[in-house]
Amino acid sequence: MKKSLTFSFAMLLGAAVLLSPVSNALEADMSSSIAYRSEDTQICYVSEIDEVISNTEIDKSVRQTVKERARTGSAFYSMTPESQEQVEQLFGVPFVENALLDTMEHSTAQKDQLNVFFNSSTKVMETEYTRYWLDGNVSISLCANTFYDVDGMCGSQKTYTKTFPKQNYSISKKLYTSRSGKCFEIYTVQDRAGCTTAQYTMFQHHATDYALYVCNENAQKSETAGIPNDYLLTLLDSFSFEN
């Protein structure tokens, strides 16, 4: 029996895409589903955690901070990282690279954030690293959940859910295979007027789960402007999974 962990997404509003047909032989590395309930619609992604990072890879300064926070009864702490490279060095995790995102400006409305979760034995269980970009009227976020070698973590499952009011939104799912050959299950959310207001996907690479969001900053305004239909696909095609 696999242990199940649950995480709820914050609602973000986003953009439309055109999806290319894919081979039936390909499957996304994270399964997902839509549950239509009486008052809302819930999207669920399930991650099979089969790879973790050793706590010995974590920098001594982080382990010391964890011990200090644990003495106060805390089970997590947050920080604002200076860069992706800093997080990689402190926590021994190689993140996926995206050449296109590297050219974009970071959002000033939301700061990048890292949450560190640890157990009573002062071992890091999971980190949650979220980065934000702004490209014109398009807001982008990439959340990376990385898992570590605590008892029961490897071989467990984690469930991610996102909920939308049924009276306001309709949701569809399509498969897309990027240039790297990786398959993604992409969700598009449209409002009652048929305008795409949210789109996202999740994927896994080594010990990290990634949630990618593309959001239309004007979605709440009457003069709503869409984004290019292939915007999310272009981002997915720009990821490198070689590390």
Image (spheres, rainbow, N blue to C red):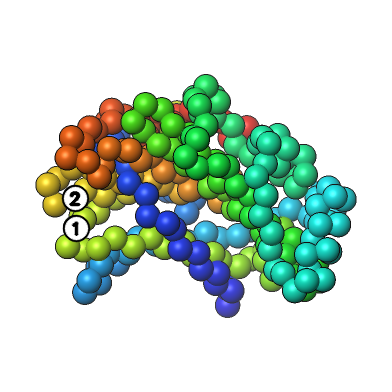
Q: Quadrant of residue 230?
A: top left
Q: Which residue is disc 1 drawn over?
A: 168
Q: Which mark is residue 117?
A: none
Out of 115 and 200, give the one closest to the viewer: 115
Out of 88 and 168, give the one closest to the viewer: 168
Residue 170 in the image: state x and y as whole percent: 20, 55
| Observer able to see residue 22 | no
Q: Looking at the image, is mark 2 or mark 1 earlier in the sequence?
A: 1
> In this rendering, would 231 be left or right of 94?
left
Residues under numbered marks 2 and 1 in contact, where contact means CB atoms less than 8 Å apart:
yes
Please identify the quadrant where the N terminus is shown: bottom right
| Observer able to see residue 170 | yes
SS type, badge 2 = strand
Q: Which residue is disc 2 drawn over?
A: 191
Q: Badge 2: how crowded within 10 Å, few (<14), some, or many (20+)? A: some
Residue 68 in the image: state x and y as whole percent: 83, 63
**Amino acid type at image mark 2:** Asp
Residue 155 in the image: state x and y as whole percent: 63, 66
**Amino acid type at image mark 1:** Asn
Q: Residue shown at 78%/71% (left/top)? A: 72
Out of 218 and 202, give the one closest to the viewer: 218
> In this rendering, would 19 be left or right of 236?
left
CA gap, disc 2 to disc 1?
6 Å
> In this rendering, would 172 be left or right of 108?
left
> In this rendering, would 179 be left or right of 93?
left
Q: Residue shown at 59%/74% (left/top)? A: 3
Q: Residue shown at 55%/60% (left/top)? A: 48
